Image (cartoon, helix red, strand yellow):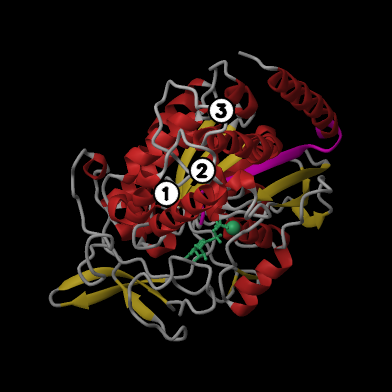
Amino acid sequence: MATLSHIIEHARLAARSVVEYGEGLINPTVRLGITGLSRAGKTVFITALVHGLVRNGRFPVFDALSEGRIVRARLVPQPDDAVPRFDYESHVQALVADRVWPESTRQISELRLVIEYQSRSGGMRELVLDMVDYPGEWLLDLPLLEKSFEAWSAETVEMSRRGPRAPLAKAWLAHLATLDMAGPADESAAIEAARLFTQYLSACRNGRYALSLLPPGRFLMPGDLGGSPALTFAPLEVVPDRTPPRGSLWAMMRRRYEAYKDVVVRPFFRDHFARLDRQIVLIDTLAAFNAGPEAVRDLQEAFRSLLDCFEIGRRTFLSSLLRPRADRILFAATKADHLHHLSHDRLEAILRRMVDRAIARADVAGAAVDVIALAAVRATREAEVRRGGATLPCILGVPATGAHSGSDNRKDLSGQMFDGMTEVAVFPGELPVDPDTLFAQGAVPFRGLAATTADEADFRFVRFRPPPLETTGDGVPALPHIRLDRALQFLIGDRLT
Ligand SMILES: Nc1nc2c(ncn2[C@@H]2O[C@H](COP(=O)(O)OP(=O)(O)OP(=O)(O)O)[C@@H](O)[C@H]2O)c(=O)[nH]1
Ligand SMILES: [Mg+2]
């Protein structure tokens, strides 16, 4: 049912799209959504893409560039005055000069790039490319928009009692058992519940477990809302179809959950998601492989519930709010440089299997969809290493020490110490040929860090340092990558003809 706030929301969106449509006629604009969970590689992707475009990187499959039709690409002031600018210069400084990865993103930011090009018919044209970067944790909130406090509570509590989550949830669940939901609202109980619940979420996210389904996103990345009542709630064991007694702890938690959705979640998705023309969805499958089969399935579940929210044609507030105007969606498995190229096709097949439902729906809606394994920045080289009688397809790179990036919870996954200078050869493991073996109920297709030690685990994805620049054929120093140009061609190639 449409409530007043929904109608106002619609009117606001409609008014904005008329204005943006008008601007788009004068300056053709692509608003590119770079979507992904935390640590998926969004910030690195934007930085590498812009770096390649403004410096004529090595993009042979990106037609406009390889045909010599791009005159130049330059950064210009962004359209939204209230959003911080994406700190491109610092990220490039980190990546290229210092050879360290950028920090985790804590706030939303935006960047506008103008590409001056020659059309195939010879005329000079400009394409405006807008990109938005945000903390990946926030994406997890999308499915909450359609969930009541009671439904979310039931689901969260149930999930916390299963699999690798159970031991991590112990302290929070013990506290939960002491709470009297129907009793008077008690602020100190709410604060303690929120604290223990947040602790549980961050333990799940830890690289050893690498679980993905962890809403609400601001609990892990509060932005400027840390400590506010909208973030001081936690799930309760409540009865789904009842209403809470007035003045009870239950009523207070429920009100704060709704406030969180109204004040935090809805504006973020309205101002960011509802305006996208094209989407690239970045997915780090390899961190999940490191952790184990539970993490791989958890990642698939997270994306299922997320992408279900993009459902097209369903007449709900959410679907109209988020209906992708996006006519192109690219699903990308990131950090493919951690694998020998022999495994890249397997990685694509696994990703395709993970997002199969979304692909089917987008197809029905007439959006173009593709799946790709890429590395926005290729930090490794390949080598064959002979061991015993066999030849192993290995990768060579300089493992990061991890010390420079304290906020990265996935550091030192191998449990080994590296000096950050010496190149090593790593046999990362081989991905399964048939993705179905990974997702079969109850299957234990391989061993990960959640269940065993680094020596015993079947995969080994070490965090490598960013590479030095490589010089292209025409003497331009560029960042090496894997298939970044193919991604660009799919995302904006048709707008540069
Ligand atoms: N080897 C390699 N590592 C990458 C690549 N992209 C990202 N990484 C690694 O993944 C980490 C996370 O990348 P980010 O771009 O910061 O991820 P994000 O999606 O912006 O993460 P949040 O800001 O936390 O949401 C980096 O610190 C790198 O260790 C890549 O192309 N190749
Ligand atoms: Mg980031």
Foreground pick, 389 / 37: 37
Give coordinates of residue 469: x percent, y percent.
59, 74
Which mark is drawn over residue 20?
none
Foreground pick, 359 / 65: 359
Query: Residue 322 falls in which quadrant of the image?
Result: top right
- Side of 366 relative to 286 (left or right): right
- Side of 206 relative to 468 (left or right): left
Q: Which residue is mark 1?
A: 212
Do residues under tags 1 and 2 come within 8 Å of each other at their CB atoms? Answer: yes
Q: Which residues are magenta?
A: 24-38
Does 86 appear above or below 261? below
- Tell me which residue sits at (63%, 51%) in the image: 134
- Tell me which residue sits at (13%, 77%) in the image: 388
Give coordinates of residue 460: x percent, y percent.
31, 66
Q: Looking at the image, is mark 3 or mark 2 nearer the viewer?
A: 3
Regarding mark 1 in the picture, which secondary structure is present there?
Answer: loop
Task: Looking at the image, tell me whether mark 3 or mark 2 is earlier in sequence order.
Answer: 2
- Tell me which residue sits at (33%, 79%) in the image: 416
Regarding mark 2 in the picture, which secondary structure is present there?
Answer: helix
- Tell me which residue sits at (36%, 80%) in the image: 424
Q: CA distance from mark 1 to mark 3?
A: 35 Å
Q: Is residue 45 magenta?
A: no
- Side of 460 relative to 441 (left or right): right
Q: Which residue is mark 2?
A: 140
Q: CA distance from mark 1 to mark 2?
A: 9 Å
Query: Residue 141 falls in which quadrant of the image?
Result: top right
Does 369 appear above or below 297? above
Q: Which residue is mark 3?
A: 246
Amino acid type of the residue tagged 2 in the rendering: Leu
Task: Looking at the image, tell me whether mark 1 or mark 2 is earlier in sequence order.
Answer: 2
